[in-house]
Image: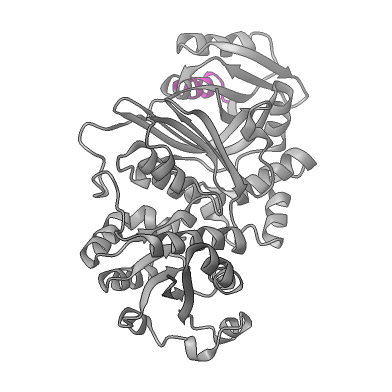
Amino acid sequence: MNKTVNVAIMGIGTVGGGTYEILTQNHDYLLANHGIDFRVKKVLDKNLERVKSFGIPESAVASGVDEIASDKDISIVVETMGGVEPAKTFIEKVLLSGKSVVTANKELVSKHWPTLEAAAKKGGAGLYFEASCVGGVPIIRALRESLQANHVNSLVGIINGTTNYILSKMTEEGMSYADALKEAQSLGYAEFNPTADVEGFDASYKLSILSSLAFHTCIPFQHVYREGITGITKADIKAGKELGYVIKLLAIGKRSGDTVEVRVHPTFVPADHPLAGVSGSFNAVYVNGDFVDDLMFYGRGAGARPTGSAIVSDVVYAAERTEPIYSDFENDGKIAAGITIGKDFTSKYYLSVSAPDAPGVLAALAGVFAKNNVSIETVLQRGGSGGASISFLTHTAQESDVRRSVAEIEKLDDANKVVSLVRVLS
């Protein structure tokens, strides 16, 4: 027997409009396959012209969030407004009124997940956010419901389409960072102010959510180590190619016993690794479980249709459930007792040093590394009238040992400068 489910959408922008289109254009398909007659009863957006552009009747436009919260016929509310406020206030209000919420808002979820989940529990409602991470790729559902038999050891992902597009252009076409960013902005992949993407904030929000789910413990986003891509140069790209690597902004989460490692930074990825071939605005997450071994989830990480697809998936999921689901860990926004966030992680490293082109310089630099327990695997040296450019690829080393080496190298000579430091996936 079919049932009718009334939905409200708060925010009719690119993603909200895409969600509306899927719910209306695929209405009969969803009805035939799931027995649910989805109807978008209300939308909330101040831009009436934009609302009309999607074919939404003006009569469906709500005067405010209170109209949606008080409507007893609406059972699911989709939030695609973005940002923290007023989205947080609106979501809390509708959750407390007993309506389940589906959101794509990774910043809001990563910063206020405990508060929102508490409101959901109090209202007897569900909170679903598949679309908050990796666009249309169903990574959250997989972590929650497909990998229960496994201890997830690690997840490594390209989870920001903007930075992957920029780095792909720099790698494949030899563009500078500035030119690649400008093109990404012209195509709508990057915002006018791209800071959230290029400085790694967006990826750190997503990694906080994904690692919390994967490792069954609260990982606040403030504890994610973060570096962006603004310092990556064409010289770094070229050196990576010579050494057999492709550079990507990676989100890396690992758990070993009660120690969890979470970091976002540019990384040299071996050219034969599956993540090396993830190009343009595509995203991918590479997961390792103790029994399933390696899995990779790949697809479009942004856009109206992919993100709308994930949202509607959650809408269907919420409509089919008899009881909402909540976190399987204490979700209080704090690191659980007994859990340590590992800061002094191990990695291979690429370092590029600008130094005087003179006898003994290379030996002096090598001596600093040796003193600090950093073993060198490969050295590339180029001389010139302005001095020498020396690149080092290390064996696996401790972050603290490499950082100490960097500081000592720059003290050896005023002309010494560590131009680049890039970690290597191994």
Residue 301 in view, yes or no: yes
Say which of 216 and 392 sits in front.
216
State whether residue 199 is above or below residue 172: below
Give the side of residue 92 with respect to residue 195, left or right.
left
Foreground of the two, 213 or 157: 213
Q: Is residue 124 left or right of residue 280?
A: left
Q: Is residue 231 left or right of residue 126?
A: right
Relative placement, left or right, of 158 versus 170 is left
Can residue 86 be seen here? The reply is no
Residue 115 vs 233, above or below: the answer is below
Q: Is residue 276 magenta?
A: no
Judged by its main secondary structure, the magenta piece is: helix
Q: Is residue 258 above or below residue 176?
A: above
Q: Residue furthest front?
A: 1
- Indicate the position of residue 62 as horizontal and vertical percent values: 43, 86
Residue 406 lies in the magenta-colored region: yes
How far across and down, in percent of the image, does residue 34 sit? 48, 63
- The single residue placed furthest to the bottom in the displayed view is 59
**Region in magenta:** 404-415
| Residue drawn at point x = 63 percent, y = 38 percent | 232
Name the quarter where the C terminus is drawn.
top right
Q: Quadrant of the N terminus?
A: bottom left
Front in this rendered view, residue 404 or 167:
167
Residue 77: x and y in percent read 40, 71
Vertically, is 39 above or below 172?
Answer: below
Question: Residue 205's x, y, as percent?
Answer: 43, 49
Camera-nearest residue between 414 and 236:
236
Q: Residue at x 77, y 23 (%)?
A: 384
